[in-house]
Image (cartoon, rainbow, N blue to C red):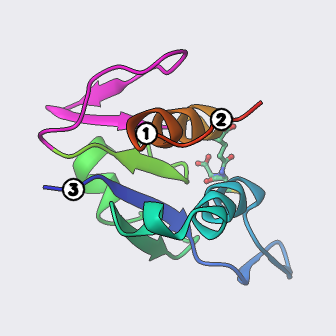
Amino acid sequence: MRDTLYVLRPGFSDKGAVWFCPYSAQVIGLLTYYPRLRETLDVVELDFMKPRYPVATLLGEDHQSLPVLVLGAGSPSSAKDVHVEEAGGVRYVSKTIEILRYLAATRGLPAPH
Ligand SMILES: N[C@@H](CCC(=O)N[C@@H](CS)C(=O)NCC(=O)O)C(=O)O
């Protein structure tokens, strides 16, 4: 199983306005900088409305904040300055800067400054 990046689909409605998620945009930006990175993981866009399946099922209803990187079975459990969390046997990284660090470290890319 590959790593799966869940992000919010841009252009979602909330509080009477339309938005994009700046955190998701940062990670999508990294994929745009390094297109070969895009080939190493699966990317899934989810709607803003909760519950955000399948993240709510995989990690629990308390862990639906996006973006989140769910790690594949063979993926490293650590990277420098990254906190890999775990819920129900599923490992994941939830802080945006740590998702960027993890992807950079495990794919041999420059690190975020
Ligand atoms: N994990 C991010 C924050 C992500 C975040 O706040 N995402 C928003 C959408 S832009 C969200 O999913 N909010 C709903 C929630 O946190 O439950 C970080 O590194 O600070």
Q: Earlier in the sequence, mark 3 or mark 1?
A: 3
Examine the image and state in which quarter residue 55 appears: bottom left
The amino acid sitting under disc 2 is: Ile
Q: Nearer the viewer, residue 19 or 44?
A: 44
Q: Return the residue at label 2.
A: 97
Q: Nearer the viewer, residue 113 or 60?
A: 113
Name the residue at 22% across, 37% down: 75
What residue appears at the point 49 percent right and 16 percent down from the top-left corner?
A: 80
Q: Which amino acid type is shown beneath numbered disc 1?
A: Asp
Q: Picture quarter containing residue 1?
A: bottom left
Name the residue that disc number 3 marks: 2
The residue identified by callout 1 is 62
Q: Earlier in the sequence, mark 2 or mark 1?
A: 1
Give the CA separation, mark 3 to mark 1.
Answer: 24 Å
| Residue 80 against residue 66 in the figure, above or below | above
Specify start and end residues of the magenta stretch as a single range.
Answer: 73-94
Residue 25 x/y as whole percent: 70, 63
> The residue tagged with tag 3: helix, strand or loop?
loop
Q: Is mark 1 within 8 Å of ligand 1?
A: no
Please tell me whether residue 86 belongs to the stretch shown in magenta.
yes
